[in-house]
Image (spheres, rainbow, N blue to C red):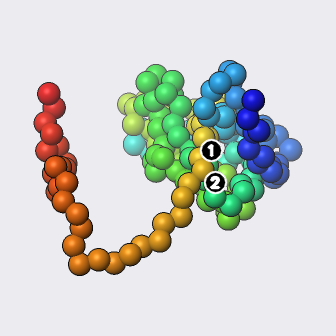
Amino acid sequence: MTEKLKVKIKRVSESAITPCYAHEGDAGVDLYSDEDCILKPGERKLVKTGIKIALPHGYEAQVRPKSGLALNHGISLCNSVGTIDSGYRGEICVILINHGSEEFKVNKATKIAQMIFNKFEEAEFQEVEELDETKRNQGGFGSTGLK
């Protein structure tokens, strides 16, 4: 078994819920709201989780929508996927948006997003006169069609 990533966590609210995996083998931990609020159709709000984390250098946390909220209520993240850098020490907040046609009540202590941890590489840029050519080359934005 591989060693688990150690993530330091601090609650900034007594009612904050520590993120956890719903099932063994899940990629993401659930993030919980630390406040009640209402999202009107088309509205977006910054929702507090009541926690702060410290990631080791070379890691990021990605905040992603919950599929059940998206399918059943049209609730997603305005900046999906949101990135939490290893140097960030502020409270984790989630920018929810209501794409649905009805108001949605966010209840304190309910799941609002999920967070996944990734190791990343830092890039060093080398300016060149030309890039190598590929079969795809500059094709993008639907250039391969839908079928």
User: To which residue does mark 1 refer?
Assistant: 117
Q: Nearer the viewer, residue 32 or 122?
A: 122
Element class at badge 1:
strand
Mark 2 vs 1, N-terminal side? 2
* Mark 1 residue type: Phe
In the figure, 106 relative to 140: above or below?
A: above
Residue at left 40%, top 42%?
Answer: 42
Furthest-front residue in this view: 132
Q: Is residue 22 visible?
A: yes
Please state, as top left, top right, bottom left or bottom right, where the C terminus lies in the image: top left
Element class at badge 2:
strand
Q: Is residue 107 visible?
A: no
Please state, as top left, top right, bottom left or bottom right, where the N terminus lies in the image: top right
Place of residue 87 in the rendered image (x, y in percent of width and height, measured from the top left): 67, 65
* Mark 2 residue type: Tyr
Judged left or right of residue 106, residue 21 is right
Place of residue 12 in the rendered image (x, y in percent of width and height, measured from the top left): 81, 52
In the figure, 108 relative to 63: above or below?
A: above
- Crowding around mark 2 (Cα neighbors within 10 Å: few <14, some 14 to 19, many 20+) is some
Residue at left 63%, top 58%?
Answer: 58
Judged left or right of residue 54, residue 141 is left
Q: Which mark is residue 140?
A: none
User: To which residue does mark 2 refer?
Assistant: 59
In which quadrant of the rendered view does residue 54 lie? bottom right
Residue at left 78%, top 46%?
Answer: 6
